[in-house]
Each structure stands twice: as structure tokens, then as C-alpha cells.
Amino acid sequence: MTLEDYHSARDGAPAEDEQSLRECLADPSQRRIAALALVDVAERDGLADETVAALARVVETTGGPDARQFAVEAMGLAGTGVDVIRAALSDDHGWVRAEAVVALSRADPGATAVLRAALDDDSGWVRRNALIALGKLGAVDQSLLVDRIKTDPHPAAREYAAQFLPEAADDTDEAVRILAAVLAREPNAYVRAKAADGLGELATARAEEALEKQGLTDRSDDVRRTARVALANARGTDPEDIEIPGHNDEAGTPPMASPPGGSDAPSPADPRSGAGDSHQQGQRGQHPPSGPGPAPSREYGPDGGGSR
């Protein structure tokens, strides 16, 4: 599903009130769109017990991947259905598991051990969402994030590990060293941009040196711009006062035009390359690539924020 399809589906909800939408869950032809509509109901008003029970049946027995994902998201927004959400972490569809990570962080924020276990999931989008959830809950530490930066094969996971490292760092010099190495050697521009931003936050002399030598001369225009702002923030000056040396942009790579979570190319191992994967957030959780698959999750969009 493309993002346009997703918004079109939202506009075509089969009913407006919760009871009618709950009844539509029993109709296979309306189940998916009714579950999606109930996401908005859950966020706005919460959900009645009867609706939660109907959504649980969708997740456990009757729903396709999209319907299961939306049902899990609705329960997470309503802060209920924890047992069903936990079970969805073992769903055979990556987008559903990715959404379950987000939903669990909302419905049971104390379940950090379960969220950490999701860092071992086969899907990079699940691992990405687990990192974001743990970071938002303040449940990450420097060693975990450095390990993810060094070892996770999925760019989106490395991207958010780099984002949360400055705040979680207990050894500033080591954090600067790691982010400077990312800025110098990481192949993915989104990850390098996060590293540049983090160096600006840490604002040591070594961080400024890395931003000036590697960030301002990066082959990506987006990374250079990020480094410029980060260096200005570290120095307490205006970005306009920072000169960027002349440099050509990466050939053939338009700024900020990659798939979910900032990865430069979809991974065949993830459900979304051809079938769907995110919060991308589950279907709704990241930059949606073209082709079939769920729409992005609202909570964990491209910037880790809350826009769809």
C-alpha cells in the first residue's frame, strides 16, 4: 500500500461511530478499513471493551496482515490489549511485529525487557522500532547503542542508534569517537546525518573538528547541511556563518528520498520490499517505498516523531 492508498482508505471508512465500525470487523470485505478507522477512534476516545475483544479476534484468527497491524495499533493507542499485543510480536508478518513493538511501548511502557528482545528480530524495521521505543522510554544505554551502530545490518536501526547516543552517553569522548567514525565511514547518508547532528549536541572540540573535516565535505548535500547546522549549534553561532566548501551532490540520489526509516534501498529480507514492513512503523511507520505494503505508523515516522 502506498501512502496515497493509505489516506484514500482512511477517507473511505465504512462507518463513523465505534459500534458500527466494530460490527464491520466481522465482514471480511470491510475488516481492514474498519480496523484502520478504529485507530482514529482509539486515539481520540479510547475503545470499549467489546471493541477491544473484536480487534483481538482480528489479530488472533480472522485478519489479514494489514487488518492485524491496524488492530494492534488501535489497541496500543487505547492502552489496552497487552496480552494480544505481546502475542503479535511473534506474528509471521514483519509489519505486524513492527507495529506491535510500538503498541507495546504505549500500552505497557514498563515492558522494556520484551522490547529489548525485539532487537533480535529478523526484520530491520522491527529492530528500528524497538530502538525508537526504548529510546523514547529512556531505556537505552551507550553500550547497547554503540553495539547497534557497529553491528546492525539495517541502516534505519543504525540511524536511530546514532540519534539516541548523545543523550544516553556516559562517556562523551567515546561517543564522539564513535559518531565521528560514523560520519567518516558510514555508507548510508541518513545515518551520517544523524551522526552529524549528534556531534553538534556533544559539542566537544573533537566533535567540531569531525563536523568541519568530514561533515562539511560530505558527498551528500543533506549531510553537509546537517553538519553546518550542527557545527553552528556547537559554536553558538548562525549557520550562515559556517561556510560549506564547494562539493557536488551524490549522483542520482535526491535529498531525503529513500525508503522507510532512512535506508537508501529496501531490503529483500524485510516484508516491505514487495510485501510490506515499518511504524514504519508497521505499515504506518517510515518513508513508504513504492509498491505494495502497509502504510507508515503514525508514531515512528521518518524523524521518529508523530507525523504520518
Image (tube, rainbow, N blue to C red):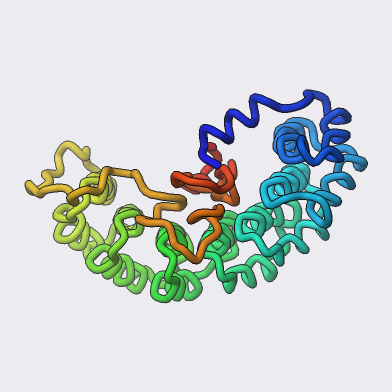
Q: Nearer the viewer, residue 96 or 191?
A: 96
Tell me what residue is drawn at x 16 percent, y 48 percent: 249
User: In the displayed structure, would residue 111 be above or below residue 291?
Assistant: below
Q: Quadrant of the C terminus?
A: top right
Q: Is residue 244 above or below residue 208?
A: above
Outermost residue, right side = 50
Residue 293 lies left or right of residue 24; in this view the side is left
Q: Which residue is at 45% across, 52% downward?
A: 261
Name the spot of residue 95 as percent of width and height, x first.
61, 55
At x 86% / y 40%, what residue is drawn?
26
User: Left or right of 292: which side holds 194?
Assistant: left
Q: Position of residue 214 (x, y in %)?
A: 18, 60
Provide residue 52's location: percent of width, then percent of height.
86, 45
In-front residue for pair 214/93: 93
Q: How many marks?
A: 0
Residue 302 visible from this viewpoint: no
Q: Quadrant of the N terminus?
A: top right
Q: Position of residue 202 (x, y in %)?
A: 34, 59
State the residue lying farthest toward the left. 246
Residue at the image point whose x is 33% and y is 44% from the top: 256
Residue 284: quarter of image = top right
Is residue 8 at all visible to an observer of this figure?
yes
| Residue at far front of view | 29
Judge left or right: residue 226 versus residue 161. Answer: left
Q: Nearer the viewer, residue 236 or 167?
A: 167
